[in-house]
């Protein structure tokens, strides 16, 4: 009996083992999102840096700046192998599919019978704030600031000295949160007209009017190689005495200097705008802008680069004062704005004129005229590349009067105009264009004290820098997220 019982038990065990081996294991499905973010590379000019979720869970929150258009964002994500991702009924492709993130968006990650929902919420990042940087007591006479394509700010300034022959040009850059001197490009006295541009290697190039004898106020150009300043070109940038200087690159290999010709000779018409280009290491002098007549006297000139095009703006100091804007591309000049003035204005203030160009080739110009109630006020106009028409940007801004107007214009990487100006009390003040109201934001006074030589510029990541002088001391601010 014991043997029979044992054999029966063994038979059952074998049968059960045989039966179980014939049945496949139940599949195990894994549906999981492992990363999520918005990348600048996928979103064109909508965002200027990457925003990546710090943690992944059923609810994912990412904060974006208020100016970001959230209606058409592309997300980049990773999921476990063989997963399918959908928003509603639409299959999602990482780095490709566009969604509207003005409200929460549910991503469903699926594999087989496994389905996991991830709710993505895009919130508003903390507003950037202006934070002061250490002051520099260098005894500044005047200055300009620009930010390199890699986001490094540089200041070019004329030194105030007891002896005019010692009023040289100096350059500073911001390093580790403090302004650091790059020495003096000039060997002696300079005029108050100078400019800065950047090579394809993002190194600064400066132009200035050199008083050194026998140069006598011709334009010199110097470049910084990381350790020293050296002359650009085998000859000077202008043939004779000039004023009202502007400079920028038209292409990586073509540097252009613009100035008002100041000698009455047979070389070039006096007080006309001369164009000088560096080609093959040699300056080619005294070309003209096609369509611009010699009787237009430039009192202020600004040059901006966009890709392989150069935009030139000129404040023409003939009665009535006007604004002209030109574009240089592929060796040819095109007149975009020809002797413009507001029909309600009798004058444009000659104290200042600024220009900026957005990624679409729209040109913004800041000026002060009396087209509003006959009173001189700050204003910004925009030339539309598509319509070729000029329109006002925001409302008029009251400010300093007479010869006390002082301002600068900059565009954020998202194309938002910022105006840095002296208000009615001469205090340094910043406004930007509100995307909803299409008017200027509440004025932000950086300091309740008189400021001079105002300058503002943006880095590619959206940070900005504003500088000015007070009692010949440099004051500067950084525009960034709180605590940065």
Image (cartoon, rainbow, N blue to C red):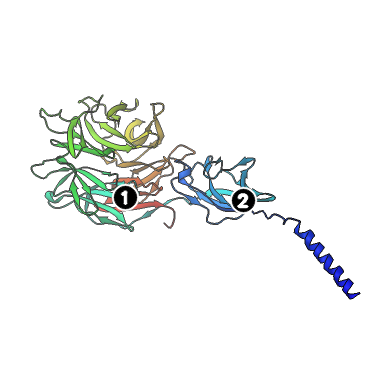
Q: Earlier in the sequence, mark 2 or mark 1?
A: 2
Q: Is residue 245 visible?
A: yes
- Residue 130: x and y, percent? 39, 52
Q: Residue at x 34, y 27 (%)?
A: 342
Residue 5 appears left or right of 183: right
Q: Secondary structure at mark 2?
A: strand
Up-down relation of residue 318 to residue 40 (above or below) = above
How busy is the neighbourhood of tag 1: few (under 14 within 10 Å), some, or many (20 plus)?
A: many
Question: Circle 2 sits on which residue?
Answer: 118
Q: Residue at x 48, y 38 (%)?
A: 437
- Residue 309: x and y, percent? 32, 34
Task: Quarter of the image for the C terminus: give it.
Answer: bottom left
Question: Circle 1 sits on which residue?
Answer: 153
Up-down relation of residue 254 to residue 2 (above or below) = above
Q: Which mark is residue 270?
A: none
> How far is mark 2 from mark 1, CA to CA?
41 Å
């Amino acid at each position: 009996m014991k043997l029979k019982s044992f054999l029966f038990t063994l038979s059952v065990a074998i049968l059960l083992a045989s039966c179980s081996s014939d049945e496949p294991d139940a599949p195990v499905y894994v549906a999981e999102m492992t990363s999520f973010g918005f990348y600048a590379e996928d979103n064109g000019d909508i965002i200027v840096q990457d925003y990546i979720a710090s943690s992944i869970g059923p609810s994912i929150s990412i904060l974006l700046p208020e100016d970001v258009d959230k209606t058409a964002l592309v997300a980049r994500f990773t999921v476990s192998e063989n997963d399918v991702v959908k928003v509603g009924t639409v299959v999602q492709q990482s780095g490709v599919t566009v969604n509207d993130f003005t409200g929460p968006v549910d991503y469903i990650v699926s594999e087989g019978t496994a389905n996991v929902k991830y709710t993505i919420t895009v919130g508003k990042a903390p507003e950037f704030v202006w934070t002061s940087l250490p002051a520099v007591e260098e005894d500044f006479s005047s200055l300009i600031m620009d930010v390199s394509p890699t986001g490094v700010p540089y200041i070019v300034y004329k030194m105030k000295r007891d002896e005019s022959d010692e009023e040289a040009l100096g350059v500073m850059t911001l390093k580790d949160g403090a302004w650091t001197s790059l020495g003096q490009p000039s060997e002696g006295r300079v005029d108050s007209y100078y400019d800065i541009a950047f090579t394809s290697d993002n190194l600064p190039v400066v132009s200035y009017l050199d008083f050194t004898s026998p140069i006598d106020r011709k334009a010199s150009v110097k470049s910084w190689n990381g350790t020293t300043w050296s002359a650009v070109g085998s000859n000077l940038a202008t043939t004779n005495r000039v004023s009202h200087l502007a400079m920028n690159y038209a292409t990586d290999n073509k540097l252009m200097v613009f100035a008002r010709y100041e000698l009455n000779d047979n070389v070039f018409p006096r007080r006309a705008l001369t164009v000088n280009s560096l080609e093959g290491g040699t300056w080619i002098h005294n070309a003209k802008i096609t369509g611009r007549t010699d009787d237009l006297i430039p009192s202020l000139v600004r040059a901006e680069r966009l890709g392989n095009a150069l935009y030139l703006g000129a404040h023409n100091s003939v009665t009535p004062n006007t604004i002209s804007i030109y574009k240089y591309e592929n060796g040819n000049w095109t007149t975009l704005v020809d002797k413009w003035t507001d029909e309600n204005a009798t004058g444009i203030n000659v104290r200042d004129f600024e220009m900026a160009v957005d990624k679409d080739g729209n040109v913004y110009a800041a000026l002060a005229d009396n087209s509003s109630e006959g009173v001189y006020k700050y204003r910004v106009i925009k030339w539309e590349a598509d319509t070729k028409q000029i329109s006002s940007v925001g409302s008029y801004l009251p400010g300093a009067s007479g010869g006390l107007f002082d301002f600068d214009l900059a565009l954020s990487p998202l194309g938002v105009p910022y105006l840095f100006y002296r208000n009615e009390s001469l205090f340094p003040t910043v406004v930007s264009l509100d995307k909803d109201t299409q008017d200027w934001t509440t004025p932000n006074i950086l300091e309740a004290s008189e400021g001079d030589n105002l300058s503002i510029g943006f880095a590619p990541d959206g940070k900005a820098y504003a500088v000015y002088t007070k009692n010949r001391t440099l004051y500067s601010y950084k525009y960034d997220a709180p605590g940065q």
